[in-house]
Amino acid sequence: QKEVEQDPGPLSVPEGAIVSLNCTYSNSAFQYFMWYRQYSRKGPELLMYTYSSGNKEDGRFTAQVDKSSKYISLFIRDSQPSDSATYLCAMSARGSNYKLTFGKGTLLTVNP
Amino acid sequence: NAGVMQNPRHLVRRRGQEARLRCSPMKGHSHVYWYRQLPEEGLKFMVYLQKENIIDESGMPKERFSAEFPKEGPSILRIQQVVRGDSAAYFCASSYTADRGTDTQYFGPGTRLTVL
């Protein structure tokens, strides 16, 4: 079993839709949870960072962490064509928090 | 403030040759990380370096791969005697610190290595 599982998609939605992306993980030591966005042929860019369980909101983006279920989510409201990218979840454990473990990424296309 | 710089952006090598990938961290950052992204796979941690020190190389293959971050100049990821399986995108990231929760790692654009 992979440490982090993420549905690769692809996911295609119309502009304005609410997008839900998620990852599951198996390592209970993970404490830090991140979502990165990666445009084609570019490096990953940090979108959201959450420590332990809970919700965090930033503009149109909401990150949720449920440690009891080992499940994290990213919601994008009012999606825009510029949101079209690959979304990567990443996580790390206390004591080696610099060592990010990534999901494979979900390719999202928002159609105008 | 310039971001993380990586060069070359694309590198083609024949089997058995050496590949040198360079990474200049963001200004003020002294922590550098290398990740590899194989086709259809997620990014995998390779190594974490501070100036003149390798802190964690647990993700590096034991043979042919080495990394350094000298006092002056960029970090270098070196792959000797490349094989086709080394073909991948190699990303460098840097951060200001590494000991306060998870400090943001800023990623470079990557070097895409193709081994013929």
Image (cartoon, coloured by chain):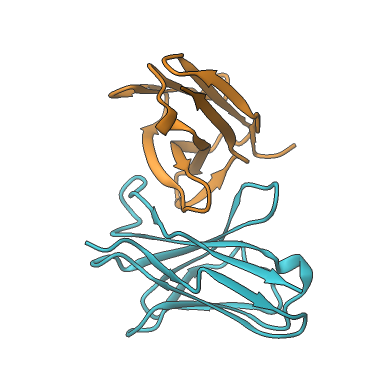
Chain colours: A orange, B cyan
Q: In this view, does A39 lie above or below B76?
A: above
User: Residue at point 73% right, 83% down?
Assistant: B81
Q: Is residue B51 above or below residue B105?
A: below
Is residue B100 among the parts visible in the rendering?
yes
Q: In which quarter of the image is residue A2?
A: top right
Q: In which quarter of the image is the C terminus of chain B?
A: bottom right
Q: How many labels does the image show?
A: 0
Give the x, y percent position of residue B108: 42, 60
Q: In this view, does A34 lie to the left or right of B21?
A: left
Give the x, y percent position of residue B59: 61, 62
Q: Is residue B77 left or right of residue B86?
A: left
User: Residue at point 49% right, 43% down?
Assistant: A93
Q: Is residue B71 above or below residue A47?
A: below
User: Residue at point 37% right, 34% down?
Assistant: A48
Q: Residue furthest front?
A: A112
Q: Quadrant of residue A24?
A: top right
Q: Quadrant of the N terminus of chain B?
A: bottom left
Q: Is residue B2 above or below residue B15?
A: above
Q: In the depicted view, which residue is nearer to us: A95 or B42?
A: B42
Give the x, y percent position of residue A29: 53, 38
User: Residue at point 30% right, 58% down?
Assistant: B97
Q: Residue furthest top?
A: A17
Q: Is residue B5 left or right of residue B63?
A: left
Give the x, y percent position of residue B16: 76, 84
Q: Is residue B16 left or right of residue B44?
A: right
Is residue A71 among the parts visible in the rendering?
no
Q: In the depicted view, which residue is nearer to us: A5 or A97?
A: A5
Q: In the depicted view, which residue is nearer to us: A86 or B56?
A: A86
